[in-house]
Amino acid sequence: MPEPLIERYRSRLPLEPGDPVVTLNEGSTPLVEAPVISERVGARVLLKLEGANPTGSFKDRGMTVAVSRAKGSGAEVVICASTGNTAASAAAYAARAGMRGAVIVPEGRIAIGKLAQALMHGARVIALRGSFDRALEIVRALADSHPVELVNSVNPYRIEGQKTAAFEVVEELGEAPEALAIPVGNAGNVTAWWRGFRELETAPLVYGFQASGAAPLVRGAPVAEPETIASAIRIGNPARWEEAMAAFTSSRGRIEAVSDEQILAAYRLLATGEGVFCEPASAASVAGILAHGLPPAPDAPPPRTVVCVLTGHGLKDPDTALNKAPPVVGCDPELSAVERAIFD
Ligand code: AN7
């Protein structure tokens, strides 16, 4: 059983001595070799399976720290805006802490598994007739005027918790990978990974990937109506804009866009070729290195190892899976019919 992330990295996390540890034993996620993708890109590719966290996404790393601190400070309510995973995680950790949770999501635009989670954990789920970016503006204003804890990644404890993913990778490999590939939405996670690497005095190339219909960092300007099949990263005005850009620049990495077609092709390849089912947004990391390769830093050789962060589990978004997968094969209840169905 994994040790709670807060216990594993307590000395590197800014919790107060009296804070409770609100945990579901998050972190300590698998790092898995990806032979098929390695072959295609000509480097050793490893997949960090963040979908193996308790609520099925990397958000739990930040949420355990943010909710522990919120509980320790006496807060009774946590709120967030979300494209889905933050909502599911906040709802679960609020339930665990005996706190109330309220989550604001763009109406009709979050994956169904995430909605089911937030509702089951007892959060108040508010479907905003507007975008994620608008929802974030509203919860930020709300948190300024009400005694509630905002647990979006603008919350510094979220970033602190999420940096532990970099610690785990460096511990497991015995050194930092030469590159990191990561999907970018609100840009909290790339900020956190980079902080984690820097705290260990390492500096892999950081390649960030946005969906081409929701790529403000690539364009250099906010996107008013972001659009992509990868609903988790349908974000037009990332909160951690400057910090994310600093990570790409200081690491001598890149921020690039990938099309929905490229995302879906990587999503399928991961599932059929590597046996790993992630959600579409997560596949942007693999789509990115397949589409853009592994550009080296100036005067340096190409990286030989790259960790792709698979941020969320495929079961989060069964609708996209079923729409993109081959149909099931109907069959009469006879041996011969089953034989034909399997072997023809
Ligand atoms: C699977 O849940 O923003 O760049 O509100 O769910 O740190 O935002 C989710 C983001 C990547 C992007 N992959 O991370 C939310 C939310 C998955 C995600 C991202 C998200 P950030």
Image (cartoon, rainbow, N blue to C red):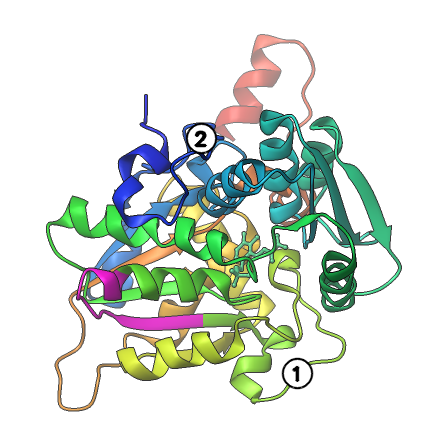
Q: Can the viewer see residue 263?
A: yes
Whether residue 202 is in magenta: the answer is yes
Which amino acid type is marked by label 2?
Val
Location of residue 177 (image quadrant): bottom left
Residue 27, compared with residue 203, is above or below; it is: above
Location of residue 290 (image quadrant): bottom left
Label 2 environment density (alpha carbons within 10 Å; few <14, some 14–19, many ≥20): some
Label 1 environment density (alpha carbons within 10 Å; few <14, some 14–19, many ≥20): some
Per the image, label 2 sits on a secondary structure element best described as: loop
Residue at (57%, 9%) from the top-left corner?
Answer: 335
Q: Residue furthest top?
A: 334
Location of mark 2 (residue): 21
The image shows a total of numbered marks equal to 2
Residue at (29%, 81%) from the top-left corner?
Answer: 250
Quadrant of the image where one finds ligand 1 = bottom right
Whether residue 41 is in magenta: the answer is no
- How far apart marks 2 and 1 lie (CA) works out to 37 Å
* Span of residues in magenta: 197-208
Residue at (34%, 84%) from the top-left corner?
Answer: 249
Location of mark 1 (residue): 222
Whole-percent x, y for residue 54 in the image: 49, 31
**144 and 107: which one is in front?**
144
Whole-percent x, y for residue 231 in the image: 66, 58
Q: Is residue 140 left or right of residue 181?
A: right
Q: Residue furthest right?
A: 129
